[in-house]
Amino acid sequence: MLLPIFCFSQQTIYSNVNHNGISRDYILYVPQSYDSNVKIPLVFSLHGKSLTNVINMNITNFNDIADTANFIVVYPQGELDVSLTTGWNVGWSFSSGADDIGFIDDLIEWSSDNYNVNTNRVYSTGMSNGGFMSYHLACNLGSKIAAIASVMYASRSLIPEVVVIVPRSVVPPTAVAAKAVASFVSLTKEATRAFW
């Protein structure tokens, strides 16, 4: 169950979803230019290990970019792992065990039900552990994720799997990745294979 708390003056929603019995927090930013008659992209910005969604929102500057490029941005909050550090469950033995794929899927559904989201233009980007989670989303939720960009995380072993499973795009993990997601530029499967 999603319980939004609206802050209309800043178009920022601080809310949570009860997923698998766990209350999961997220921040959703709706651009000033949002028009409910026009389908717009949805971008997930995933924080790195030991960070929070609030810190991620403040350091990525995606709200300002969303205002100029006209997309909704979601900042989900990762759960505490066994070392009591926030992060994403990407299958590591020390991960939280939380169903982060299901959590993101719930957020896609809720956003699509409540806003005019172009479901063919749902993207994920992340820093470090959030970048790895973007790869994890591409592999496990590929029918809903159009493209990903990882910042400060690379996985040559995952790229071929993502490319085979997801007939979409992966932006290589470079300093350009964040800008590429903002402008929705990506590589084809063939260019991704050639790059790696």
Image (cartoon, rainbow, N blue to C red):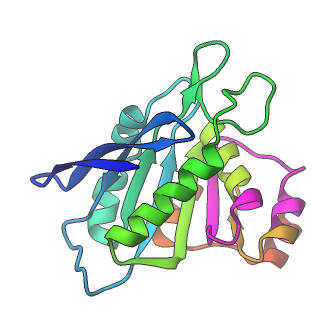
- Vertical side of 123 occupied by 27: above or below: above
- Residue shown at the point (69%, 62%) measured from the top left: 141
- Vertical side of 50 occupied by 21: above or below: below
Picture coordinates of residue 177, whole percent (x, y): 59, 57
Q: Is residue 42 visible to us here?
A: yes
Q: Which residues are magenta?
A: 138-163
- Residue shown at the point (57%, 58%) measured from the top left: 105
Task: Name, please, the residue furthest toward the left.
Answer: 9
Q: Quadrant of residue 165?
A: bottom right
Whether the magenta-drawn stretch holds residue 73 is answered as no
- Residue shown at the point (89%, 62%) measured from the top left: 160
Q: Is residue 159 left or right of residue 105?
A: right
Between 179 and 30, the residue placed more toward the observer is 30
Q: Is residue 78 left or right of residue 52?
A: right
Q: Is residue 162 left or right of residue 28?
A: right
Between 139 and 63, the residue placed more toward the observer is 139
Picture coordinates of residue 18, whole percent (x, y): 45, 41
Q: Quadrant of the C terminus?
A: bottom right
Picture coordinates of residue 95, whole percent (x, y): 71, 27
Between 135 and 28, the residue placed more toward the observer is 28
Whether the magenta-drawn stretch holds residue 140 is answered as yes
- Vertical side of 18 occupied by 2: above or below: below
